[in-house]
Image: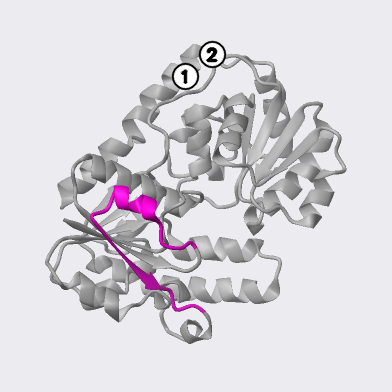
Amino acid sequence: MLHIVSFNVPYPANYGGVIDVFYRLKALKSLGLEIHLHAFEYGRGEQEALRDYCSEITYYPRMTGLRSAFSRRPYIVQSRASDQLITNLRKDDSPILLEGLHCCSVLEQINDRKILVRAHNVEHDYYARLAAAEPHLLRRIYLRTDARRLRRYEPILTKASAVLAVTKSDLVHFQNIGCRNVLLMPSSHPDDEVVSIPGRGDFILYHGDLSVAENVKTVTFLATNIIPRIPYKVVVAGRNPSPTLTSLLARFGNVELVANPDDSQMHGFISQAHVSLLLTDQPTGLKLKLLNSLFAGRHCLVNSAMVSGTELGQLCTVADTTDDMLHALADLMATPFSQSDIERRSLLLGTLYSNAANAKLLVSLL
């Protein structure tokens, strides 16, 4: 038996963190592991689909709002501190996997068990960068405040039996703050094998959650610096674009904006595009949309931050300036995607980014 404490209900698996949790559940179940899932529910509802992977599921309300805002703990931790969770975890002595620093108030009260922490990010760095990209003053203040709280709270990870880092750079960070057993375990994801299609596509794809400030900033950069200077069709696909972003992209005759595509549509865009253009200001964590594009798409053009701390740069074209991106797009759009490209991807991704291999690593720690 393994207790998994998840910061959110990990189904549907439709954004980064819950994708990692959900596909880890699937991989652990396939190894025959019995799982008691403890999930904080705050809008996604109880999900019957999770019963296919968990022998028991317990849901807890997240204490959002002002009652969690005024605490020395980070808001993301305080709002998930639950006496009932502690009571339930103490009913046996099975090992515990905490999904994210979000759930680490458990480490304050239980110290006689094997407890692993999946660190999805160096959270204070992540929040500081979110704050830098946030245009709204009150939310920017909140993000900066929680970044400071997260930095102060992070040493709680030294109490864990092991910390599972997403990237090599995260691994080094957690070692440097004194965590005793830090291992690299890249994110779990929906892809079991490379299914990229050789040949050519006729458009460039940018995809992401278009309600997130970081992604809005990226699309605005593309609309200002890249799209007006290229002759190629561009598809921008993602969740909940604002009217402002919709209006911005409507100025360009070569841009198609696709709002809220379903999984099948998104897979189609990724597989049919000739270039997936993926940029970020966040050199933290592993970008699951990059993995999706490498497993299912053709050429990937990224900036350095997108592949920071990973081995994925060798499978992408990396460019950090506007001119370098423009030259790279021209070269890639003229270059067919080949079977040898697929074989190269399969070799690296099948070794380092295998859900089954990472699940076996986790089980070995139990």
Residue 310 vs residue 366: left or right? right
Q: Which residue is mark 1?
A: 342
Can residue 241 be seen here? The reply is yes
Q: Which residue is mark 2?
A: 338
Q: Position of residue 118 (x, y in %)?
A: 32, 56
Dividing the picture into quadrants, the one containing residue 35 is bottom left
Can residue 300 be seen here? The reply is no
Query: Which amino acid lies under the numbered mark 2 shown in the image of this protein?
Result: Ser
Q: Are marks 1 and 2 in contact (CB under 8 Å)?
A: yes
Q: Position of residue 253 (x, y in %)?
A: 86, 34
Q: Position of residue 244 (x, y in %)?
A: 80, 56
* Coloration mode: one colour
Q: With respect to residue 246, does 30 lie above or below? A: above
What residue span does the magenta drawing correspond to? 44-64
Q: Residues within 10 Å of mark 1 (few under 14, many from 20)?
A: many
Magenta segment includes 254 = no
Label 1: which secondary element:
helix
- Residue at 30%, 57% (x, y): give it: 175
Dividing the picture into quadrants, the one containing residue 104 is bottom left
Q: Position of residue 38 (x, y in %)?
A: 31, 64
Q: Residues within 10 Å of mark 2 (few under 14, many from 20)?
A: some
- Residue at 26%, 66% (x, y): give it: 158
Query: Which amino acid lies under the numbered mark 1 shown in the image of this protein?
Result: Ile
Q: With respect to residue 184, does 192 lie above or below? A: above
